[in-house]
Structure formats: structure tokens, C-alpha cells
Amino acid sequence: MPIAAILVAALGALALRVVLEGRAALADGDAAMDRDQPLTAIRAYETAARWYLPLAPHVDDAYDRLRALTKTKQTGAALAAWRSIRGAARATRSLWTPHAADLAAADTAIAELSARDPDAGPAGATTGDREAWYRSRLARDVRPSPGAAVLAGLGIAAWVLGAIAFARWGITASGGLARRPALVAAAAILLGLVSWAVGLYNA
């Protein structure tokens, strides 16, 4: 029970910090907009969106402000806003993507806006070629796959728990081995190491 209370308190403190930091970044962005500094505001709004917590209002507010800035007639600012949306959406992914629609829209818009630059030599000679090139680049996912990351994490957990179990129950008071607990702990350690290695290999 005390452990559960400590865990709940720690999670509550973490959630409170996420909300406070997110709201502070959102306020910084609003202040930058009041000073007519859209690029500074975009960076602050992205920071607010990265302080992600499910159902936290500052996250949706940050995305709303970034989407509004994508409609500016200044191509540089619009592109920066889309890139911030993309960066925030990718940074807050775990086993799912909370803002998948925003990420997809950002990839499309970034490719279209970037393709309008005729000096983007390696990207292609025509607007269509450049847009296709940017889309292919943006579609690449360089982050580890969620499944592999989970497998590696579970492997580490199994290894650590197996080592603790071995130290606690696998060794007798006289310094010998308690056969059954030691075998179970060793199996957990081995399984954990294998899972960790497979997860890293496939990440």
C-alpha cells in the first residue's frame, strides 16, 4: 500500500509538471505573437505540444495555434509551422500516434511547399518530381518500431527481475543454490537477454 501511494504521488507530480510546463510554453507563444514574432511563437507552441499528456488542454490549444499559423501568406512561416506540427506529433508517439491526422497533413503540406522551390536541385527538375521526392523522404520512419521497442523493454525488465529473483531466492543461506528457484530465475534472465537482443536487432 505505501508503495502504491508513492507511485500515485510520483505520477501525479509528473502530470502536474507536464501541464504547467505546457501551459507556460503556450503563454510564451502567445506573448511572441503579441510582439509579432511568429517564428518564435511557432517554437514555443511546438514545445507546448511536446509536453504531451492525454486530455491536457494545452496540447490541443498548441496544435490549434500552429494550424492557424500554417495559413499565413509567408511561405517560410507556414513551412515552419507545419514542420513544428510534424516534429511534435512524431516526438509524442509511443505505441500509437496521438495526432496521426496532424502528422499526415504536415507531411503532405511540407512536401507541397518544399516542392515550390525551383532551386531544390537533387529533389527533381519539376514541381511534381520534387514533391514526390520530399514525400518519399518524409515517409521514412527512422525511429525504432513500437513492437521492437516494447520487446526490448520487456527483455530488460525480465532480466532485472530474474537477477533479483536469483539473488533473493536462488541462493540459500549457506551459500548454495536452491535448484528450482535458481533455474526459474536463470531462465528469466536468459529469456530477458534474448528478448532484449531481438528487440534491438529489429528496432
Image (cartoon, rainbow, N blue to C red):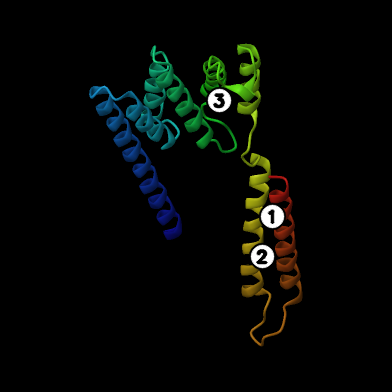
Q: What type is the residue that disc 1 sits on?
A: Trp
Instruction: Tell me whether circle 1 and circle 2 mark residues in contact (CB < 8 Å).
Output: no
Q: Earlier in the sequence, mark 3 or mark 2?
A: 3
> Which residue, given by chain and number where applicable, does mark 2 sit on?
162
Q: Position of residue 146 (x, y in %)?
A: 64, 40
Q: What type is the residue that disc 2 sits on?
A: Gly
Label 1: which secondary element: helix
- Picture layout, residue 20 above or below residue 37: below
Task: Evaluate whether residue 92 shows in this view.
Answer: no
- Picture layout, residue 171 above or below residue 142: below
Quadrant in the picture for residue 59: top left
How many marks can you see? Answer: 3
Q: Which mark is residue 100?
A: 3
> Which residue, given by chain and number where applicable, does mark 1 sit on?
196
**Nearest to the observer: residue 24 or residue 164:** 24
Q: Taking 141 as reference, is 64 left or right?
A: left
Label 3: which secondary element: helix
Q: Residue at x 62, y 51 (%)?
A: 153
Q: Position of residue 194 (x, y in %)?
A: 74, 57
Q: Position of residue 71 (x, y in %)?
A: 41, 13
Q: Position of residue 183 (x, y in %)?
A: 76, 70
**Nearest to the observer: residue 66 or residue 10:** 66
**Nearest to the observer: residue 87 or residue 148:** 87
Q: Residue at x 63, y 28 (%)?
A: 137
Q: What type is the residue that disc 3 sits on?
A: Ala
